[in-house]
Every structure is written in C-alpha cells, then in structure tokens.
Image (spheres, rainbow, N blue to C red):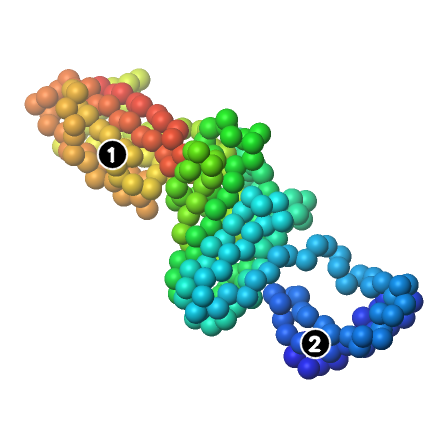
Amino acid sequence: PEPGSTAIVKTLSKSLKGSVVFPLAPGIFQINFPWHSFLKPQSVLEGILPKPLPRMTLVSPSRAGTLSSPDQRFEALFPVKSFYDSTIVSLEIANDSSFPGDVPPPYRRLGSIYRLQPFDQPIDNAVTIKISIPPELQTERGLGLYYWDRKKGWRFLSALTDSINHQLSSRVTSLETFGIVQDTIPPVIRPLQKVFRDTLLARKGKISFLVKDEMAGIRRESQIKVTINGRWQLFEYDPEENRLTLAVDKKESPAQIEIEVVDNVGNRLVKRYWLK
C-alpha cells in the first residue's frame, strides 16, 4: 500500500478504518487509527500481530546507530554514512521451523538465526555485526559465523573472535540472515595423479592435489603448508578449482611430501606421500 491509502483492519468486535503512514520494513507498515476507535477495552486487534514485530531503527547517513536483538545476543553497529539515504532497519530472530534451509550433517547450525533487513538496501560504509556465543556452546570447537545465501545455503563469513566476551564479529556490506554453524570436519587432501598406497607415481615435473573444505572453507594460501624432505616448498593454489600444484625434482626421488591444511575454523589435516 502507498502512504495515505486507507487500510481496513478487523478486530474482535468490529472493523477499523485507518490510514497507511509509511513502510517500516518489507511487508510491515505503520497504520494510524482515530483515537476514539480504542476507547473500549474489547477493541483488541486480532490478526495484526501474528508474530512479534522485529526490532527497528531509523539509520540516517549523518549519524551512527545500533540495533540489538530481543535476546541481546546479536548486535548491528551502523557507522556514519552506512546507507546512502535514511533507512529503516529491522532485526528479528527467525523461526527455526519456518527457515528455508539448514546445514547438511554432520555439520550443525547452533543457536538462534538473526534476520537483518532490508536485504537489498545498498550499503555505503560497512556495518559491523556481533553475535554472542551462548554459554552452553562456549566450549564447543569449530564454531563460525555464517550468512544465508538463497542459492548456496550457509556461507562462511570471515570474523574476529573475542575469547573474553565469547563473541564473533565481522564487517559486512549487505544485510543478511546470520547464524552460527559448527564444522569439526577436517579439510580434504587427495592426489590428482596415480598413487599406490602412499606412493605418488609422477611422470612429469609437477604434481597436483585436490585441497578443499566443504563447510568453513580455506580463505588464505597461508593456511596451507608443503614440505619436501622437511624443507618448505613453494606451491600454487587455485581456490576456484581447489587445486594445489607444486614442482618436484626427480633427482630427489625418493622424497617425502608433507601437506598440512587448516580450514577457517581451525580443523587441521596432515597427509604424507612418497614420491618415486
């Protein structure tokens, strides 16, 4: 509805005619009613609030603002010039049963889901979000901050960990749905050439490996370490193809190759192979 248009709302006893003022959030509007409509206590609105309204704040480009979730475990900090125009931002705890997707086992989504809107509003200056880890989860390992992608599902979000306050924080350039996911599964390392037991059968001067992590991912090349006979070895890593390639000198054969990979939440895997 457009501002100024008429809205008819049914109550327990009658219908009320009001006027739409302005949208508060996608699908939520402020409606003003004549004051005399509410003189009688029995005029309780029915069906207007099928669920608790999300918390809202008006964020102006000229001043900073903060919005916290009802359980005080999620916070969004909007710096000056967060948006190009004044924007009403809403924050609500999503209903688990109605949420469109979850993580595949053995991964686990833990705690509440926080929906920060409007999703399609352009951001000029990055917004800082903070999510507190519930007390019952603070001893768990492999916890990370994720956002929901409608096409790809839960996606890892690089975050800072505050071990004192038990918080994960990140700077984001879009408003999304956020949550905590647990990933305790180590990365995958697999040779892309013939291998007999733990011995690589390489005919050329280069060998390649599949190096990937399904959930948390591998963000930086520094999370991978390769040594040959105990000496650090230069390598190339293509994150799009999940391919690690390194040059080998057959004169060093037989040689032991050791590959160590740590994913974004600290899961570690070490694989050793012999090159002949």
Q: Choose between 62 and 132: the one closer to the eye.
A: 62
| Amino acid at pointer 1 | Ser
| Secondary element at image label 2 | strand
Residue 209 found in image quarter = top left
The disc, 1 or 2, on the residue closer to the chain's N-terminal end is 2
Residue identifier under label 1:
208
Q: Is residue 130 above or below residue 252?
A: below
| Amino acid at pointer 2 | Val
Residue 217 found in image quarter = top left
Q: Is residue 252 left or right of residue 224?
A: left
Mark 1 or 2: the one toward you? 2
Answer whether residue 192 is visible to the viewer in this image.
no
Instruction: Give residue 17's position: percent from left, percent from top.
Output: 81, 77
Q: Choose between 68 and 1: the one closer to the eye.
A: 68
Q: Is residue 50 left or right of residue 104?
A: right
Q: Which disc, if any, is residue 243?
A: none
Instruction: Give residue 228's position: percent from left, percent from top.
Output: 17, 24
Residue identifier under label 2:
20
